[in-house]
């Protein structure tokens, strides 16, 4: 009775594992097909996105295959012998074949993704450089225009009047000097203006002369920041997706090779040595 009950439990467990494994495999295949819709194989961005999604979902079919092979192992351990028959009629054959195909797929995705991320990074860096050059050209054109010079002059006049008004009002001047949010450079100019009224004019002229350089520096700093972001993002994508794809390829190929060998399809028999006279 105990042996019969144990065999029934093992049979039920095996059936459940096979069912769950098949469901995982079928749902994963459907998910893979959905990822390819709509197809755009010539678009590098589409290739990178699909490759990342395939790698992210790559562990699910492997879990399903593991459950199926565990179920067959339970059957073998319970029955004591492996049922003989045509390998092509066995679920293990199709699972092993699918594992081999997925292993080949992920093996091909590994160099493809590395090359795509390399080309995408080069394209992004070229675009960033073009945008920075365009912004610099526009800035130089704007700086040399009369309208820009007039705006600078108007701004200088406004600031000069504001600072001069503070200098003429001791209470307002002391209040401004005690403001912690006021830049130290401005506080120094206000202090100097008490003894040197021309300090304000010199400060504003210096700021106006340094403005083009400051704007160009901002463009260069922004360019370097974007370049660093593009390089970092490309490196992360290459490492995460590339290495994961390679590991999945190794896992699936191992499962496929082991499964086909267990069915007797892949035989590694030793060659007989021919006798020598």
Image: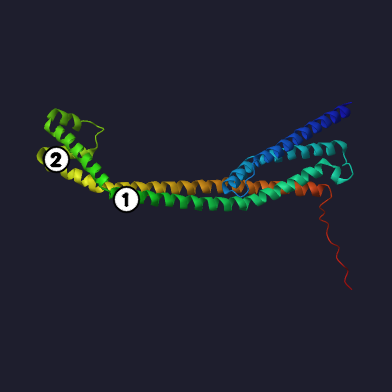
- Frontmost residue, 231 versus 204: 204
Q: Secondary structure at mark 1?
A: helix
Mark pair 1, 2: CA separation: 35 Å
Judge whether 30 appears above or below 227 on screen.
Answer: above
Residue hosting label 2: 192
Residue 176, labelled with which disc? none
Q: Position of residue 171 (x, y in %)?
A: 14, 28
Residue 170, image quadrant? top left
Q: Position of residue 255 (x, y in %)?
A: 74, 46
Residue hosting label 1: 141
Does residue 138 appear left or right of residue 236 in this picture? Answer: left
Disc 2 crowd, CA 10 A, few/some/many (<14, 14-19, 20+)? some
Q: Position of residue 88 (x, y in %)?
A: 85, 45
- Frontmost residue, 169 versus 69: 169
Disc 1 crowd, CA 10 A, few/some/many (<14, 14-19, 20+)? few
Judge whether 167 appears above or below 258 on screen.
Answer: above
**Residue drawn at (62%, 43%), measured in percent from left and top?**
50
Q: Position of residue 34 (x, y in %)?
A: 67, 38
**Residue drawn at (16%, 43%), measured in percent from left and top?**
201
């Amino acid at each position: 009775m105990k042996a019969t009950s144990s065999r029934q439990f093992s049979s039920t467990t095996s059936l459940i594992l096979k069912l769950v494994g098949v469901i995982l495999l079928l749902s994963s295949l459907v998910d893979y097909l959905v990822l390819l819709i709509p197809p755009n194989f010539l678009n590098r961005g589409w290739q990178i996105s699909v490759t990342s999604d395939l790698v992210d979902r790559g562990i699910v079919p492997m879990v399903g295959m593991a459950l199926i092979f565990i179920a067959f192992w339970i059957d073998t351990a319970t029955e004591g012998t492996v049922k003989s028959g045509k390998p092509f009629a066995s679920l293990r054959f199709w699972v092993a074949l699918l594992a081999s195909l997925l292993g080949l797929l992920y093996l091909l995705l590994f160099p493809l993704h590395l090359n795509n991320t390399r080309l995408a990074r080069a394209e992004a860096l070229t675009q960033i450089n073009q945008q920075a050059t365009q912004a610099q050209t526009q800035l130089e054109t704007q700086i040399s225009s009369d309208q820009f010079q007039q705006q600078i002059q108007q701004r200088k006049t406004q600031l000069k009047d504001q600072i001069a008004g503070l200098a003429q009002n001791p209470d307002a001047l002391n209040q401004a000097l005690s403001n912690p949010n006021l830049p130290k450079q401005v506080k120094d100019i206000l202090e100097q203006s008490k003894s040197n009224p021309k300090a304000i004019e010199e400060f504003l002229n210096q700021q106006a002369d340094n403005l083009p350089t400051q704007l160009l520096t901002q463009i260069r700093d922004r360019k370097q920041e974007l370049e660093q972001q593009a390089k970092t993002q490309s490196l992360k994508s290459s490492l995460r997706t590339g290495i994961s794809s390679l590991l999945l390829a190794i896992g699936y190929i191992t499962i496929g090779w082991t499964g086909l060998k267990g069915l007797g399809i892949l035989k590694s028999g030793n060659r007989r040595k021919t006798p020598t006279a």
